[in-house]
Amino acid sequence: MESTAQSTTNKFLKMLTTLAFWVIVAIIAGVAVGIIWPDVGIASKPGIDYFIKALKVLICPIIFLTIVTGIARLESLRELGSIGFKAFIYFEIVSTVALAIGILAGEVLKPGHGMHLDASKLDAASVEKYTHVDRDVGSVMGILKSAIPSDPISPFIHSNTLQVLFMAICVAIVISLCKPEIKQKALKPLDFLQHWVLKLLELLMLFSPVAAFSAMAFLIGKFGIHTLWGMIGLLAVMAFACLFFIFVALGIICYFAKVNIFKFMRFIAKEVLVVFATSSSETALAPLMQKLEKAGLHRGAVGLIIPTGYSFNLDCTNIYLSLCVIFLAQAFDVPLTLGHLISILIVLMITSKGAVGVTGSGFIVLAGTLSALPDTGIPVVTVAVLLGIDKFMSEMRAVGNLCGNAVGCLIVAIWDKKVDMEQFRYAIEHPKEFDFHA
């Protein structure tokens, strides 16, 4: 009896030392403060702002160093092309599936049916900043031009991950073409820098409960629980569509790769929790890369696929875009034919790529999509009705994108034989051993 009590005590004490436990406590406390003392909740916003700013300082160096050291250690540049080609195929197929899920969820569950909203009563000025953006939404040339930096410093200062990705691949290719002895000399200081940058990341993640608290307190304090009720149907359908995508669509993909999706989600649960609390994928980007690498995935594969996926494989952002188009059509009584639905899917396959590295990209791309679909009869101004709940929907997008990219990295790594499956299976069976300060 005494040994059982001692074991329970030990488990409790061990739980108190896990970061995930304190993140959960912080989320609950943040919600409570936001409800009881909304002014305090709003005033706590700097906690999440400074946390994300600090992360942005580390994210680009981590991406750069991981990609360079990972790709340079590939046996040949042919391996780089192989990983990149397979990642491209995976991204295109799964992104299209996500768009289809959003359309089907909207058509079957009809979250906007019966709202009978009038577009003429909306304030066009409220969405002006989203509809008047000097950006080629969905333009391939626009994306390619935005990926090439004007200088090697600005991408790190402004946390432009797409430009950092471009520079890292270029540097990695140059190092790969060098003689073996020169390559080793070049990689040695990079390995040293990566080690200490990751140490700084580990220390910074200790403050994630503070960030989670301030994010949730501000969210509830600013918008209030009551703001959800008016749009609860859309939020519920969005949540259902994201969960369906993660556990059914990605679950089927993982099944064929002989990976249990539930065990894999448990493995990345802490990162999911932090992203949910902070509504930002950036808070888990670097920790996720580190965790997957420790779990047996090749550094080159992780370094290339994860950052690229955060630019071109935003699966739950795709669900959001297609679902919202259907929702707006229903809410404003705009009938859509099968031809319209096919057009929406095709246009979104292109315009969704315009979300690369843009703040407020959901509204920008959604507005751009409606502009590109004049035949549907959905006015661009209708996106104004989504402004009130976008903060809540952004949490779902961020969590879903994290899960989608983690699975994408795993599947491409397995496909290209860039994963130690024995080590990986041990990792998903013992996830706590792979957490920061688990």
Image: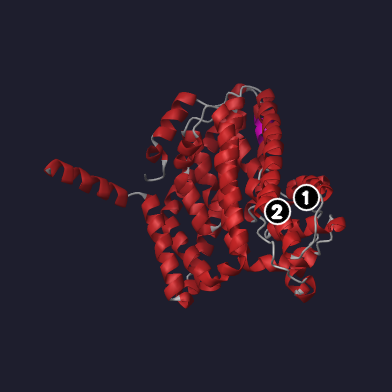
Q: Secondary structure at mark 1?
A: helix
Front-lying residue, 369 or 60: 369
Q: Amino acid at mark 1?
A: Thr
Which of the labelled discs sits on residue 321, or is there none? Answer: 2
| Nearer to me, 124 or 215 | 124
Residue at image position (40%, 50%) is: 20
Q: Which of label 2 and label 1 is nearer to you?
A: 2
Q: Which residue is labeled 1 in the image?
A: 351
Q: Would you say residue 86 sits in the magenta stretch?
A: no
Please state the extent of the stretch shown in magenta in the rendering: 171-175
Residue 421 at x, y percent in the picture: 49, 25
Sequence-wise, the earlier of marks 2 and 1 is 2
Residue in view at x 45 percent, y 24 percent:
422
From where the camera sits, is residue 61 visible?
A: no
Q: Local crowd at mark 1 within 10 Å, few (<14), some, or many (≥20)?
A: many
- Cα distance in 3D space between marks 2 and 1: 10 Å
- Compared to 21, does 125 lie above or below? below
